Amino acid sequence: MHEILSNQQNWAFLTLEDYQIIAPFDGVIQDIPWNIGDETTADEWVLVENKDLYEIILSLDQIDIVKVKQGMNASIVIDAFPKDSFTGTVSRVSAVATETSGVISYEASVVLSIPERSDIFSKMSATVEIILEEKNNILLLSSSAIQTQQGKSFVQVQSRGGAFEK
């Protein structure tokens, strides 16, 4: 009898080894959409969260997708943390269109640059602003400060001594 149980245990172990869930990264299993004994299909997925990588998938229209490039910086506000602003980088821009109710859209991915946080969960909503262009050493002036004389535009600047210079 002991030999029969041992053989059954070995068979069960070998069978269990044949049905492992293996991910290409460390993570935490958050959802398994079936129960023991259920049959699965190829379109059912196990949700594994990688707490070392936070990624937001964006759906962009055809006007915006052509402006977005891999490597661009982004500013992210997660709805659950409206006072916190996070940074990120565009990691992928897809050229493959998706059509939903006659509307064409394209996917872009933004990877967040944040330390590990246990309070950020998958499927949280966020607002993402992709920075298309940055300029440094720029002075922003009101148009009313710009003067024109003899076809030339200038701004008067007050010097440290109090005098105004063009």
Image (cartoon, rainbow, N blue to C red):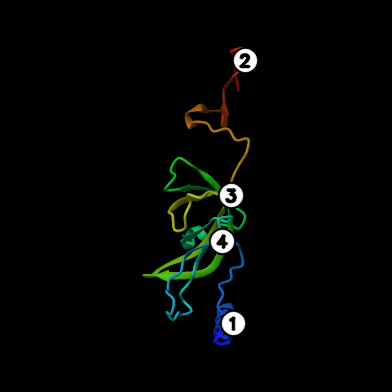
Q: Secondary structure at mark 1?
A: helix
Task: Assess whether mark 3 and mark 2 are in contact (beta carbons under 8 angstroms).
Answer: no
Whether residue 67 is visible to the viewer of this picture, yes or no, is no
- Marks 2 and 4 sit apart, C-alpha to C-alpha, by 60 Å
Hey, which quadrant is residue 165 in on the image?
Answer: top right
Amino acid, disc 4: Gly
Q: Indicate the position of residue 73 as horizontal and vertical percent values.
A: 58, 50
Q: Secondary structure at mark 3?
A: loop
In this rendering, the answer to whether 107 lies above or below 88 is below
Per the rendering, the mark at residue 85 is none
Of residues 80 and 91, which is closer to you in this image? 80
- Marks 3 and 4 sit apart, C-alpha to C-alpha, by 18 Å
Identify the residue under disc 1.
10
Q: Indicate the position of residue 140 as horizontal and vertical percent values.
A: 54, 33
Task: Assess whether mark 3 and mark 1 are in contact (beta carbons under 8 angstroms).
Answer: no
Crowding at mark 2 (Cα within 10 Å: few <14, some 14-19, many 20+): few
Crowding at mark 1 (Cα within 10 Å: few <14, some 14-19, many 20+): few
- Marks 1 and 2 sit apart, C-alpha to C-alpha, by 88 Å
Task: Assess whether mark 2 and mark 1 are in contact (beta carbons under 8 angstroms).
Answer: no
Q: Earlier in the sequence, mark 2 or mark 4?
A: 4
Task: Assess whether mark 4 and mark 3 are in contact (beta carbons under 8 angstroms).
Answer: no
Q: Indicate the position of residue 49 as horizontal and vertical percent values.
A: 52, 60
